[in-house]
Image (tube, rainbow, N blue to C red):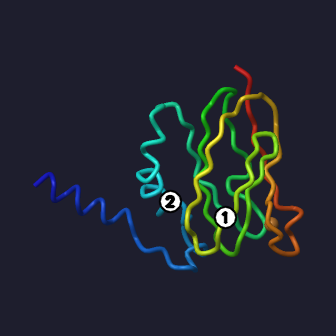
């Protein structure tokens, strides 16, 4: 009885997200369970701050990510349209995000306090240069 309920709930969490998913609800939400399960081995520390981020022309959502210095940070990034990139120079992050909504997991340690730009590292169109977010690392 309990197992049957769990199985049904699990299937409901894994819809096939079509390419046009960006029109509706955040596609990162649909993919997050699979992404977290796939990288469970890396999550030995319970102190990983995980954020689902959607890249689309020409924003990141959320645009501001707030953590504390010393945090292990995990960004699970999906694109709602074409190819984008996530660049956070301070923490040597430079990762492509493919079209089609496949999640990309980015792990780093927020080893220094400050506010750091998150940029799109892939030329994605006319608004590319304005496609920016902020990583705010609070001191403890
Ligand atoms: Cu871009």
In this picture, residue 95 sits left or right of residue 120 = left
Q: Examine the image and state in which quarter residue 99 appears.
A: bottom right
Q: Quadrant of ligand 1?
A: bottom right
Which SS class for mark 1? strand
Give residue 70's position: percent from left, percent from top: 66, 26
Q: Is residue 32 above or below residue 111?
A: below
Quadrant of image for the N terminus: bottom left
Residue sitting at x 43%, y 53%: 38
Q: CA separation, marks 2 and 1?
A: 16 Å
Nearer the observer, 72 or 49 = 72
Quadrant of image for the C terminus: top right
Residue sitting at x 74%, y 61%: 85
Give residue 124's position: percent from left, percent from top: 80, 72
**Residue identified by numbered label 1:** 97
Q: Is residue 140 above or below residue 134?
A: above
**Residue identified by numbered label 2:** 29
Nearer the observer, 15 or 111 = 111
Disc 2 packing (10 Å; few <14; some 14–19; many ≥20): some
Q: Is residue 128 above or below residue 88?
A: below
Asked if the residues shown at circle 2 and circle 1 are in contact, with their CB atoms under 8 angstroms apart, the answer is: no
């Amino acid at each position: 009885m309990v197992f049957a309920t769990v199985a049904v709930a699990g299937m409901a969490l894994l819809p096939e997200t079509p390419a046009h998913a960006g029109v509706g609800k955040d596609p990162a939400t649909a993919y997050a369970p699979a992404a977290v399960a796939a990288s469970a081995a890396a999550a030995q520390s319970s102190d990983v701050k995980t954020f689902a981020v959607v890249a689309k022309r020409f924003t990141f959502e959320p645009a501001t990510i707030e953590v504390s210095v010393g945090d292990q940070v995990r960004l699970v990034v999906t694109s709602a349209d074409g190819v984008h990139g996530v660049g956070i120079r301070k923490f040597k992050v430079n990762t492509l995000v493919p079209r089609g909504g496949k999640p990309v997991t980015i792990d780093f340690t927020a080893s220094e306090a400050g506010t750091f730009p998150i940029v799109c590292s892939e030329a994605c169109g006319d608004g590319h240069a304005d496609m920016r977010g902020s990583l705010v690392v609070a001191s403890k």
